[in-house]
Amino acid sequence: MMISSLSISASTILRDAAGAAGNIFALGLFASPITTFRRIMRNGSTEQFSGLPYIYALLNCLISSWYGSPFVSTDNLLVMTVNSVGVVFQLVYITLFIVYAERMQKMKMLGLLATVLCLMGSIVFLSVRCFNSNVRRMFVGFLSCASLISMSASPLFIMNLVIRTRSVEYMPFYLSLSTFLMSLSFFIYGIFNNDPFVYAPNGMGVILGISQLGLYSYFKKRSDEEDTEPLIVSYS
């Protein structure tokens, strides 16, 4: 009985440690657009930047935060905390984008923001009023999983760009590393928590993260080799 208790305790500690690490790595991801918004504020314009990634990220964080809340799942507090922080970051970015955007962009972003908030309100209403606790967890869990998978798949566009341009300019190393470490942490967290709605999408994130880091290493090495090749000077 004591051995079983110790085993459960160790599993809980490892789960919480992985979740806490995931929260820390996620902060790096959430803070990564700060440089972009410094430029926007300095220039007083959103230029050619798109606000859509922040809208998508907000919806993802809202759904995942709701899934991690005690109203849906009682054992995913660290999922709720990290995504709640993500909601705050995305709302700040969206607000700044709206402030500095041109009139048409402002209207578009305000419309998209209203749509996201209405959609999330509908999800909360349906899950609370129409489903019991087990079905509610399945319903929100599938939505969260789908949202996370779609977010995890977004780096595929960057990876395609890296392959086409044979340059890692548009795939910063530390951003890729943070994404991989966060996905790995929550994959481990989901495994110890026996929660497929957490470990399945983050497992995909781990695979994509490894692929990104592999691409970065390959093309960075090729770039360095080309830069160090001796110049051949012709005197003819």
Image: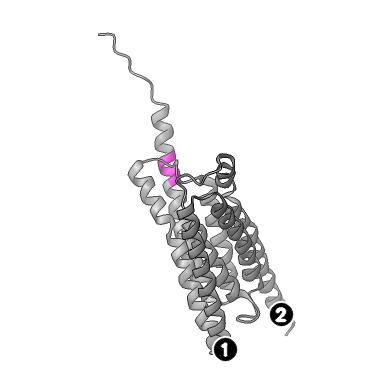
Q: Residue at x 59, y 48 (%)?
A: 34
State which quadrant residue 93 falls in: bottom right
The dominant secondary structure in magenta is helix
Q: Residue at x 63, y 82 (%)?
A: 71
Read off the magenta span.
Answer: 216-220
178, above or below 75, in the image: above
| Relative side of 149 to 134, left or right | left
Q: List the residue tagged with mark 1.
A: 129
Pick the front one: 189 or 70: 70
Q: Give the x, y percent position of residue 108.
A: 46, 60
Contact (Cβ within 8 Å) of mark 1 with mark 2:
no
Kindly tell me whether residue 193 is visible in this rendering.
Answer: no
**Image quadrant containing the C terminus:** top left
Residue drawn at x 52%, y 78% is 141
Query: Is 201 placed above or below 214 here?
Result: below
Residue 62 appears in the rendering: yes
Residue, disc 2: 3
Label 2 packing within 10 angstroms: few (<14), some (14-19), many (20+):
few
Left or right of residue 233, residue 171 in this image: right
Residue 91 quadrant: bottom right
| Residue closest to the eye, 194 or 38 | 38
Where 233 falls versus 100 (above or below)?
A: above
